[in-house]
Structures are given as structure tokens and as C-alpha cells.
Image: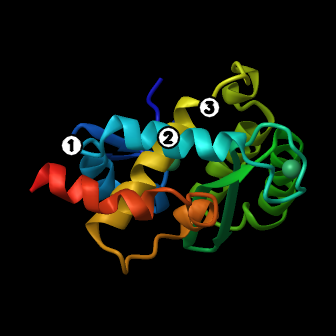
């Protein structure tokens, strides 16, 4: 099964190709240039920043359970316009569950109202909220998805300090280390 090159969600239907890369939605496709650039970010910097987030308290409920990236999947549509996306949240798994339930409620209400994509993609998004395979992964270490998201977040910071990509805003507050290390990264690549 294809997985999104940005958010790593399974692409069940309506995926978008960009060369070798595959995206689950137009929203994730916007990050395509940063997916490439992210491969250049030093692994030790990515690892340190990821671990930092993983060990910090949940920014939503302030519990000290491990924090990771949790996705909710939403869709809205209106006659000829349809928009679906995966929404990353940095939080504990209890908060992640709440976001998925909200994603189901949102999609049930706003998803169906276009042909054909509203009718086709609404069940897909609801299904992904219910059966995200990432729920069953080992929780004692940061997930691959969190690592990837941090890597891309760092890439956007290095590529353009002014850029604002909505999916990354969720982790803006959680990544505290990278700014100090940006100079050393620039030096390595100069
Ligand atoms: Zn995606
Ligand atoms: Zn929480």
C-alpha cells in the first residue's frame, strides 16, 4: 500500500503523485519541496529534537505520558469542491483519540456534499480515524512519523524562516532546540 511521503498515512484513494513521491491530499503535497530538502538535515539534530518532543509533557493536557504525533483525518465538500487532509497533532495518545473522534464527527457532518469525491472520500477518512495502524505501534520510543515530521519541520525552518505551512504549526512550540543549531547546520553544508 502506498503511504504519504509527508504524513506517512496510507493512501487508500485519491492520492497525488509527484515523481517518486506520493501524497494523501493536496494539503500534504504542498510540502513536497521540503520532503526532498529534509533528506539533507543532519540525523543527530533530527534525533535530538525528536527526543526532546517525545519526552516533554503533553502540550494539550499537560500529562507526563509520552508525546508523539497523532493524526486526525477530515474532509469537507460543497457541490464541486472537496478538500480532505490529515491533521498532525503533537500530544499524548488520550488527546490523540479525542482528535480522531472529532475528525469522525467533522467528516460525518461536512464530508458528503459533493460528487463524486465527497461520497467516495468521506468513508475513507472516517475509516482512517477508526483504524490507524499507527495505534498499534511500540510506544516506548518516538515513532517514525514523529521523526519525519520533525525532519520536515527543520527543513522548512532552514529553507525559509518566513514560510508558514499549517500542518507544521502544531509542532512549532514543541521544537525548541533547532533554532540554536541552525548555524552549525549551515556551516556543515556551506
Ligand atoms: Zn499525507
Ligand atoms: Zn494529552
Q: Residue at x 53, y 30 (%)?
A: 144
Between marks 3 and 1, how big is the CA–CA gap? 29 Å
86 sits left or right of 46 in the view: right
Q: Nearer the viewer, residue 141 or 144?
A: 141
Is 187 situated above or below 126? below
Q: Residues within 10 Å of mark 2 (few under 14, many from 20)?
A: some
Q: Residues within 10 Å of mark 3 (few under 14, many from 20)?
A: many
Element type at mark 1: loop
Q: Percent x, y for residue 147?
A: 50, 38
Name the mark on residue 142.
Answer: 3
- Residue that badge 1 annotates: 19
In this orientation, does residue 14 appear?
no
Residue 130, picture quadrant: top right
Disc 2 Cβ-to-ligand 2 distance below 8 Å: no
Is 12 situated above or below 156? above
Q: Percent x, y for residue 27?
A: 48, 62
Is 142 situated above or below 85? above
Please name which of the two marks, 2 or 3, marks the residue nearer to the observer. Answer: 2
In this orientation, does residue 139 appear?
yes
Q: Percent x, y for residue 100?
A: 81, 48
Q: Residue at x 84, y 65 (%)?
A: 109
Between marks 2 and 1, how big is the CA–CA gap? 31 Å
Amino acid at each position: 500500500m502506498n503511504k504519504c511521503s509527508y504524513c506517512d498515512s496510507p493512501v487508500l484513494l485519491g492520492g497525488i503523485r509527484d515523481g517518486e513521491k506520493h501524497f494523501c491530499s493536496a494539503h500534504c503535497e504542498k510540502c513536497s519541496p521540503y520532503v526532498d530538502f529534509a533528506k539533507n538535515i543532519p540525523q543527530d539534530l533530527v534525533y535530538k529534537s525528536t527526543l526532546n518532543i517525545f519526552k516533554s509533557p503533553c502540550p494539550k493536557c499537560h500529562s507526563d505520558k509520552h508525546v508523539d504525533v497523532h493524526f486526525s483525518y477530515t474532509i469537507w465538500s460543497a457541490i464541486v469542491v472537496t478538500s480532505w487532509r490529515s491533521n498532525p497533532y503533537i500530544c499524548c495518545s488520550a488527546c490523540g483519540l479525542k482528535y480522531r473522534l472529532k475528525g469522525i464527527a467533522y467528516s460525518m457532518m461536512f464530508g458528503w456534499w459533493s460528487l463524486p469525491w465527497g461520497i467516495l472520500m468521506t468513508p475513507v477518512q472516517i475509516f482512517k480515524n477508526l483504524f490507524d495502524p499507527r495505534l498499534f505501534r511500540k510506544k516506548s520510543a518516538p515513532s517514525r512519523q514523529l521523526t519525519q515530521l520533525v525532519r520536515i519541520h527543520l527543513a522548512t525552518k532552514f529553507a525559509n524562516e518566513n514560510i508558514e505551512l499549517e500542518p507544521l504549526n502544531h509542532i512549532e512550540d514543541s521544537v525548541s532546540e533547532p533554532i540554536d543549531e541552525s548555524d552549525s547546520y549551515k556551516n556543515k553544508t556551506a
